[in-house]
Image (cartoon, rainbow, N blue to C red):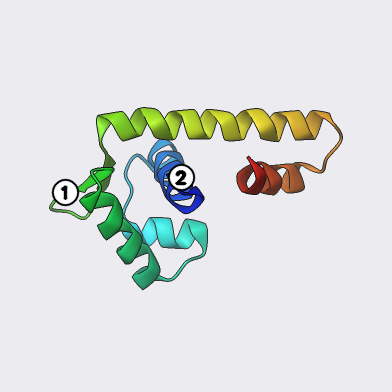
Amino acid sequence: MGKSLEDYLETILILKIKKGMVRSIDVADYMGFSKPRVSHAVKQLKTQGFLLMDNNGQLLLTDSRQAMAEKIYERHCFFTKYLTEMGVDPKLAESDACKTF
């Protein structure tokens, strides 16, 4: 799976935790992407069996992809904490954990 798809899965999981539900517009706002870009990615994720969309436009990770997203998020949190403990600025650590690992 590509880094970009991992980012989408992680974002959907984070938003689900924070808001209880996730729509494409929420993903676009959170990631700072255009709505068409996110719509294209969502279509790919649906086609590949990564997520479902209900009649209200809510994005739902499939069970296997939910577990995958949780592992991605766990890894992200681990490296963010590790970098912060090494003295890296928390915002930079967050960004670097997302990009590097």
Q: Give the total number of marks visible in the rendering.
A: 2
Task: For mark 1, give the secondary structure.
Answer: loop
Q: Mark 2 points at which residue?
A: 6
Mark 1 or mark 2: whose residue is earlier in sequence: 2
Q: In this view, does 75 lie above or below 42?
A: above
Q: How far apart are marks 1 and 2 (CA)?
A: 21 Å
Q: Position of residue 74 (x, y in %)?
A: 54, 28
Q: Which amino acid does label 2 sit on?
A: Glu
Q: Where is residue 28 in the image (x, y as percent from the top left)?
A: 43, 62
Closer to viewer: mark 1 or mark 2? 2
Residue at x-position 43% and y-position 71% = 34
Badge 1 density bin: few <14, some 14–19, many ≥20, Cα 10 Å: few
Q: Which amino acid does label 1 sit on?
A: Asp
Question: Residue 54: which numbered mark, if any?
Answer: 1
Residue at x-position 29% and y-position 51% = 45
Badge 2 density bin: few <14, some 14–19, many ≥20, Cα 10 Å: some
Task: Check the picture and name the quadrant holding the N terminus.
Answer: top left
Question: Residue 28: which numbered mark, if any?
Answer: none
Q: Position of residue 31 (x, y in %)?
A: 50, 58
